[in-house]
């Protein structure tokens, strides 16, 4: 079997439906999340962002000329962390997604996305290619559990007491 180093949301959902459902629920619990991009000098930049799961893709929409859009145009690598919410409970655990953001220039695709999420219609639209999905949670008030998925690899689960 050939290994790939990235895939879209639909392929991840097909490979790991339970984890994908948990990740979508965590992102769906709050509107704003944290996006990490790389600045021109290579240092990290974190900013707030809304995300959408539509038509088998994870989409990132951004305001015109935003620094995060400029970062992604220059270097498409990103990390996206779900809003942990109030307090420290984190319900379904802490989830994050890493990958590459590919800007969509196709007017028809952008218009279709705009219909689904209006208002406002974003000026920059990126679809994502996943390189890693991680969920961290506490089980039985005893174990720290880390689930790590990468394209072409089985889901790894690590438990620590």
Image (tube, rainbow, N blue to C red):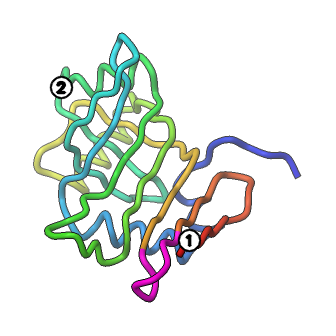
Which circle, 2 or 1, is nearer the viewer? 1
Tell me the residue at 40%/32% (across/down).
Answer: 104
Q: Position of residue 54 (x, y in %)?
A: 39, 59
Assign a secondary structure to mark 2: loop
Say which mark, if any, is on residue 33: none
Asked if 82 appears above or below 108 in the picture, the reply is below
Q: Which mark is residue 160?
A: 1
Residue drawn 28% across the image and 67% down it: 28
Q: Are marks 2 and 1 in contact (CB under 8 Å)?
A: no
Q: Where is 151 relative to 147, above or below?
A: above
Number of on-image labels: 2
How busy is the neighbourhood of tag 2: few (under 14 within 10 Å), some, or many (20 plus)?
A: few
Q: Residue at x 42, y 67 (%)?
A: 23
Check the image and name the residue furthest to the front.
161
Q: Where is mark 2, residue-wise? A: 64
Report the span colored magenta: 138-145
Indicate whether residue 139 is drawn in magenta.
yes
Q: Nearer the viewer, residue 120 or 159?
A: 159
Q: How many C-alpha atoms fall within 10 Å of the one at disc 1: few (<14), some, or many (≥20)?
A: few
Kindly identify the residue that appears in the image at 26 percent across and 46 percent down. 34
Label 1 secondary element: strand
Q: Where is residue 31, by image quadrant?
A: bottom left
In the picture as drawn, the residue positioned furthest to the right comes out as 1
């Amino acid at each position: 079997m050939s290994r790939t180093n990235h895939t879209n949301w639909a392929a991840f959902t097909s490979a790991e439906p339970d984890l994908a459902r948990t990740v979508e629920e965590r992102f769906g619990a709050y509107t704003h999340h944290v996006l990490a991009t790389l600045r021109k000098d290579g240092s990290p930049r974190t900013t707030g962002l809304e995300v959408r799961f539509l038509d088998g893709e994870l989409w990132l929409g951004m305001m015109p000329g935003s620094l995060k859009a400029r970062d992604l145009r220059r270097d498409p690598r990103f990390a996206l962390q779900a809003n942990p919410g109030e307090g420290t409970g984190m319900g379904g655990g802490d989830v994050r997604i890493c990958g590459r953001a590919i800007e969509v220039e196709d007017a028809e695709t952008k218009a279709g996305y705009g219909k689904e999420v209006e208002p406002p219609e974003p000026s920059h639209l990126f679809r994502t290619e996943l390189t890693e999905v991680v969920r961290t949670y506490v089980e039985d008030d005893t174990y720290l559990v880390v689930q790590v998925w990468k394209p072409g690899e089985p889901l790894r689960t690590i438990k620590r007491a």
